[in-house]
Image: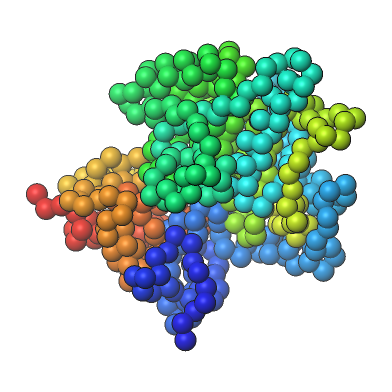
Amino acid sequence: MTSPVWHPFTQHGLNEPIPHIVRAEGAVLHLANGATLIDGISSWWVTTHGHCHPRIAAAIGRQAAQLDQLIFAGYTHGPAEEVARGLIDLAPCADGQPALKHVFYSDSGSTAVEVALKMALGYWHNLALDGREEVRSRILVLEHSYHGDTIGAMSVGARGVYNAAWAPLLFDVDTIPFPAHDREQACLDALEAACAQKPAAFIVEPLILGAGGMLVYSAPLLREMAAICRRHGVLFIADEVMTGWGRTGTLFACEQAGIVPDIMAVAKGITGGAIPLAATLATAPIFDAHRSTDRARLFYHSSSYTANAIACAAAAANLAIWREEDVLGRIAALAEGMATRLDELARHPAFAHPRQLGAIAAIDLVAPDAGYLSDLAPRLRAFFLERGLLLRPLGNTIYLMPPYCVDADQLDSLFAALHAAGEIFGAQP
């Protein structure tokens, strides 16, 4: 029987197989037919400590039997309060003190970005009402960025085939060139010039652009970007949806640059990948610009499941794991193992541009037809699936972002499959 399910980023007209997963643990997915898959991309970058982590699963069960859902407009509950305080304590600090002091909950990375953009525009709107500032409404973005698939998030992401149908809905932005090795100064010069025009905010994926091709840039460059924004009074928004929760080697990528954004979006690994939740953290001035005796100035944003108690309980368990276990030690060991194997793979003539940041590794397959809409990525996905691996290349860019519990044998299987893919799909010398 044909399934009625409409899957994301899936062209159903191609009739590609859609594996049926029945259970999971650690880095392994179990299929209905008895086969297994190594989850090499953390099920779209969300699973950190491993699937069905006992501490997180237990917390979900306990909370589901106590309080499942509560309207969050004017009400609160323990898990949401606990997670908010935990996030503030773990977030990037200024002079050793928490600087991101307020937490607004939502349910996905895309909505966390929407909230961040609305906070930024609301900040300038309310300051203008008081006559303290002029209205600022322009948003600066980094070339090749991806921030989600809702309207605001698409507007601040790269334009292309994946959002062309909705172009009439997207607002205009100013794009800063990506700081490739030979364009770093051009990037900074463009940002300086754009900030001089008094935009509202600059939004970035810190240190690595995910869906844009796993493009890496340096921490000093990120620090200088933030400094330019600070000099011009432009709000700096860090999209840590993918980069957060240890992916880049530190809890949050901004730590490596020693910066504190004005607004920071987090999601994906916030619950260890077990259940949807997101949060947008803001500094006191952002919150204070919305705080008033005038109800017209409140922050008009919500969803029915804002701060769902079960999701917050999962996040609280995740925060406890980060506080009580050596997660960064596991990430460092994983990063070392990935680096050794990536270095070996990079010697193969079918591959180019190896790059790694923490527990993220990527390499480009040299192939004659490597565009986003070529059939290379689907063929690679099928190739990896046949070998018991869940990998999802971005065009000709093959990347690994496994859960932190992945073991050496599983890493060997992942990199061996990449080597085999180079032999079969790479351009012949």
- Where 298 falls versus 235 (above or below)? below
Q: In this view, does 352 lie to the left or right of 329?
A: left
Q: Is residue 74 visible?
A: yes
Q: Is residue 146 left or right of residue 64?
A: left
Q: Can residue 204 be seen in this view?
A: no
Furthest-right residue in this view: 293
Residue appearing at x 36%, y 54% in the figure: 393
Q: In this view, does 115 lie to the left or right of 390?
A: right
- Where 136 falls versus 148 (above or below)? above
- Where 39 falls versus 226 (above or below)? below
Residue appearing at x 49%, y 79% in the figure: 3
Give x and y (percent) for residue 264.
63, 35
Residue appearing at x 69%, y 34% in the figure: 119
Residue appearing at x 81%, y 32% in the figure: 297
Give x and y (percent) for residue 379.
28, 64
Q: Give the quadrant of residue 88.
A: top right
Q: Which of 123 and 24 is in front in this view?
A: 123
